[in-house]
Image (cartoon, grey):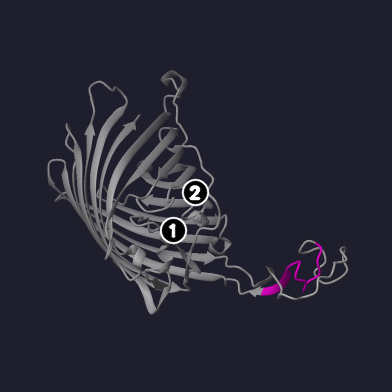
Amino acid sequence: MRAIPSTRRHVGHLLPVLTLLLAASDLPASAQVTASLSAGQGVEALQPTGDAGDTEGNTAVSGALAYTFLEGRGRVGYDGVYGTYAAPGDWGSWAHEVGGRYRFDFGANQAHHLYAGGSAVLRRNGTAWEAADYDAVGGFANLELHGSDTTVVRAGYRLDARRFTTTPALDHLQHTASASLLVNLPSRTTLIGEMTTGFKSYAGLPTGTSLVAARPATGAVDTPGTGGSGGSGAGLGGGWRQGTSAGLVFTPVTTPGVPETDAGLVSAYLRVAQSIAERIGLSAELFHRSLFGDAPPAVVTTPPGFFDDGVYDDPFASAMTSARLSLKGLPQRGPSWLVTGTWQDKPYENTPAIDTTGLPIAGQLRHDRVVRAGASLSWPIAPDRTGAAEIAFVPAYDFTRSRSTTSDYNYTAHTVTFGVMIGY
């Protein structure tokens, strides 16, 4: 398995500006428009293990616009995200997603629900990882059964097709199926257990032949080419026959290609949430993932501090065990707050470790161990004066300690971010 480098120049994109010019009287009584915009600027001190640290800025901007109708049964919307990472090079990224879903109610008192919908995604990255640009479409169906006032059973299926604009070996079709159980206990404890299985078929690349141009050895005799269809190499190298010093030698080279592969995973998730005081909750989460089938043909090189465990941080490339603790407060007045701590162990199945020079380490695979901690506030600004809109000041601090057999992911980082969130 190999990392995907950058292969072409970046084309910039403009951040969509969402302007709402909607009057409440123009909407049906059962319809509602919601919008949000958040922007944050951070300063990150990142210190690679064994090297001097560096401080850089990062930016995160996200916007969402949604329209719900038929008393909330239908929803369509747009989400846009722009972000940069505190790493040398252009690690910026844009993601645009449009989608919708519809809820079908059935059963006694319409207590059970079936959700069906789909989405389309366009993702573009900076020059440091633009070989990972992709377009995607997906669809899903989720069933929600309320067996009693305290239990909910859910089951779902999702199909996603993604096409990488410059790296077709990573094109894939992904199937995901899941089932979960939620139980609310009289002790104000909530238990959630979920099992997920996934299958991913990567397109690969066929074996082929390409012509590689090179200068011939010095001293060869110059011979004019005949042009047209006569002569080997006619029409190549500016009208000179193959084997001349003035022109170029075009040698056929066989490219091995990348085989089609089918990867699979099974994961288990458990969450326990407990109310410990009025509007204060504590939760603990455990997660484990195992792999089967083939390994993905490649992994995408991502910047330090990037964690998505999704398309780029491909879950089909690594097993994982993780634990997370969260303490959250939602007071009726004043700032809401969140404190989290996460531990993660992530061995990769077939990805070689990379040293400081960018070369694979013989006999060693990539293995990441990450500890993260964070704290954030959401502080309402003039809540008595903003009417239907909500404006909040959002400061946050994040600590990351990543230890990896691959040099680029061996670092410690401290990040302070100040942001503003506007919702309507």
Q: Picture quarter containing residue 231?
A: bottom right
Total marks placed: 2
Q: In this view, does 52 lie to the left or right of 292?
A: left
Task: Say what amino acid the circle numbered 1 marks.
Answer: Tyr
Q: Do the residues labelled 1 and 2 touch (CB within 8 Å)?
A: no
* Residue 376, x across and y down, in percent: 22, 44
Residue located at (76% from left, 66% from top): 247
Kind of element beneath mark 1: loop
Magenta segment, principal secondary structure?
A: loop
Outermost residue, front side? 219
Mark 2 surroundings within 10 Å by alpha-carbon count, few (fewer than 14), some (14 through 19), many (20 or more)? many
Q: Is residue 80 left or right of residue 193?
A: right
Residue located at (17% from left, 47% from top): 281
Can residue 346 be seen here? The reply is no
Q: Nearer the viewer, residue 113 or 424?
A: 424
* Residue 236, x across and y down, in percent: 78, 64
Mark 1 surroundings within 10 Å by alpha-carbon count, few (fewer than 14), some (14 through 19), many (20 or more)? some
Q: Residue 141: within the magenta?
A: no
Can residue 50 be seen here? The reply is yes
Query: Looking at the figure, which quarter contains the C terminus?
Result: top left
Separation (CA) of disc 1 from disc 2:
11 Å
For residue 193, above or below residue 232: above
Residue segment shown in magenta: 239-253
Q: Which of 84 and 323 is in front in this view?
A: 84
Kind of element beneath mark 2: strand
For residue 179, above or below residue 230: above
- Name the mark on residue 123: 2
* Residue 54, x across and y down, in percent: 29, 53
For residue 363, above or below residue 53: below
Q: Nearer the viewer, residue 244 or 131?
A: 244
Residue indicated by mark 1: 312
Task: Say what amino acid the circle numbered 2 marks.
Answer: Arg
